[in-house]
């Protein structure tokens, strides 16, 4: 199973072709550092160098907050607790800095 993440709204246009990223079985990291698997530029520095990781564990995608500025999911008023993990559901909206990211689970064919 793969995980497709897609930036929505005006920031997507600024990212060009980088507005989506597909994570495979090995998962990866998201952040503003060029070594991240998915780089989200942010001159305001709300996005940490390595803001989050995604990993496939026991058939479920997990999002782990590795940031100093937090991650909000959907319309939850409070961000995830620092260094915590939570499952990613289909159509979750992940808020990282100025980015709203739509999650899509892509089952094996």
Image (cartoon, helix red, strand yellow):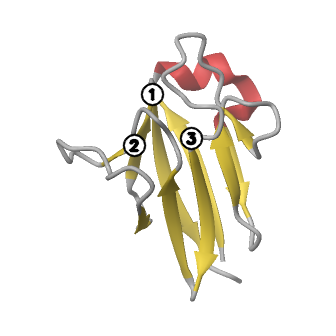
Q: Position of residue 70 (x, y in %)?
A: 39, 39
Mark 2 and mark 3: span between their CA atoms? 8 Å
Please give the name of the residue rendered at 54% of the width and 68% of the height, measured from the top-left corner.
105
State the quadrant of the C terminus: bottom right
Residue projecting furthest to the bottom: 58
Instruction: Say whether residue 100 is left or right of residue 54.
Output: left
Label located before the other in sequence (2 or 3): 3
Q: Which residue is mark 3?
A: 51
Query: Callout 3: helix, strand or loop?
Result: loop
Check residue 97 in the rendering and tell me which mark sits there, or answer none: 1
Label located before the other in sequence (1 or 3): 3
Q: Position of residue 43 (x, y in %)?
A: 60, 11
Residue projecting furthest to the left: 77
Q: Residues within 10 Å of mark 1 (few under 14, many from 20)?
A: some
Query: Callout 1: helix, strand or loop?
Result: loop
Label located before the other in sequence (1 or 2): 2
Q: Position of residue 83 (x, y in %)?
A: 45, 55
Residue projecting furthest to the right: 35
Is the residue 56 above or below the residue 63 in the image? below
Which one is nearer the viewer's eye here, 65 or 102? Answer: 65
Is the residue 14 above or below the residue 49 in the image? above
Please give the name of the residue rendered at 67% of the width and 23% of the height, measured from the top-left corner.
15
Q: Which residue is mark 2?
A: 71
């Amino acid at each position: 199973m793969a995980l497709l993440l897609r930036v929505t709204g005006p920031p997507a246009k600024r990212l060009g072709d980088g507005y989506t990223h597909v994570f495979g079985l090995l998962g990866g990291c998201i952040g503003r550092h060029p070594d991240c698997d998915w780089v989200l530029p942010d001159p305001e520095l709300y996005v940490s160098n390595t803001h989050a990781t995604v990993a496939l564990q026991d058939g479920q995608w997990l999002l782990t907050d590795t940031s100093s500025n937090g991650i909000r999911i959907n319309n939850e008023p409070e961000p995830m607790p620092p260094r915590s993990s939570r499952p990613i559901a289909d159509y979750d909206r992940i808020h990282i800095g100025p980015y709203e990211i739509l999650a899509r689970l892509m089952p094996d064919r």
